[in-house]
Amino acid sequence: MSEMLSIAVQKSGRLSEKSLDIIRQCGIDFGTDSRVLREVADNFPLEFLFVRDDDIPRYVSDGIADIGIVGRNEYDETGLELEVVRDLKFASCRLSIAVPASFDYKGLRSLEGKRIATSYPRILRSVLDKAGVSAELVVVSGSVEITVQIGVADAIADLVSTGTTLRMNGLVEAECIYRSSAVMIARPDMAEEKKRTLYRLMERIDAVMMARKKKYILFNLPKDRLDEAALIIGGMKSPTVTPLMDPGWLSVQSAVDEERFWSVFESLREIGAEGILVMNIEKMTE
Ligand code: ATP
Ligand code: ZN
């Protein structure tokens, strides 16, 4: 059996670049320009299969590919039971009910007996069923946002990331019913050799994702403020501290959560930190 793992990636669309970015950041090299149907990485047993995103869950299920990167929405909509190995946190979007401005929306109950256009009938149906609402689903494969204007539907359930498309079509986002982002899916019955490759890949992906959440900061600090700095940075076992030529000063370095970065930065300024240097972290382990 081969250790070569095949991964299905969207050929072109919202997921393509970021899917390849994360793999590239794992130190896996491959030709970038052609995106031929199949392509093998130069320095890792990984083979790419570039396809339409809708087909990815089925290809993984059928064993055409071992793993795939696809929107959680597409995966859930198929109803297939594969392993969701990781949430990759990019291509975030929500499935929302949108209605024309004239529609007096008061929750899912308002949809009772209405016609709702969507490309995600399975997800929508399960949400409506849970709420005890019965509605007629109008299944369309694209341009869901025009169905109200052309008189096919009373409301829609569609993917939204900013809401601009909805507004341009005279619709208002009424309620988010489901959240999605890109996930890594895998077939459950993979041979041991491939599982080992997947494990190696996931270890690298975890390191890349962890690094994306952190910044590395380095600064000079008056010696007597070190305890305060350690408190501000928090969370870590300890910052790394190095003496400087000037005996009154230290050089301090540490990783900091991206989301806390600005508050940490400002607090460090307040206790006299100077020459603050901020760097992206490429990879990181716990
Ligand atoms: P393909 O040609 O491969 O079938 P597509 O047009 O169906 O592509 P894209 O529009 O590239 O698919 O979207 C892929 C995924 O990106 C969606 O399934 C969803 O998970 C995610 N996504 C993020 N933001 C949005 C958005 N605003 N609208 C639609 N999808 C979004
Ligand atoms: Zn698609």
Image: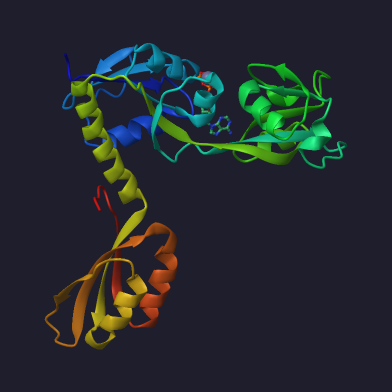
- Quarter holding the N terminus is top left
Position of residue 97 in the picture relative to residue 11 (left or right) = right
Q: Which residue ends up furthest to the left in the rendered image?
A: 245
Using the rendered view, name the quadrant where residue 121 is placed. Answer: top right
Residue 244: give x, y in percent of width and height.
Answer: 14, 79
**In percent of the image, x 48 and y 19: which residue is there?**
80
Q: In this picture, is 265 found above or below 52? A: below
Q: In this picture, is 74 found above or below 212? A: above
Q: In this picture, is 276 found above or below 148? A: below
Does the rendering let one see residue 119? Answer: no
Using the rendered view, name the quadrant where residue 129 is placed. Answer: top right
The answer to which of 277 and 123 lies nearer the viewer is: 123
Does the rendering let one see residue 79? Answer: yes
Q: What coloring was used for the rendering? A: rainbow
Position of residue 126 in the picture relative to residue 36 (left or right) = right
Residue 221: give x, y in percent of width and height.
Answer: 26, 80
**In percent of the image, x 71 and y 41: which residue is there?**
175
Residue 246: give x, y in percent of width and height.
Answer: 14, 85
Residue 52: give x, y in percent of width and height.
Answer: 46, 16
Number of numbered markers: 0
The answer to which of 240 and 75 lies nearer the viewer is: 75
Using the rendered view, name the quadrant where residue 63 is placed. Answer: top left
Position of residue 213 in the picture relative to residue 284 (left or right) = right
**In percent of the image, x 61 and y 36: which residue is there?**
178
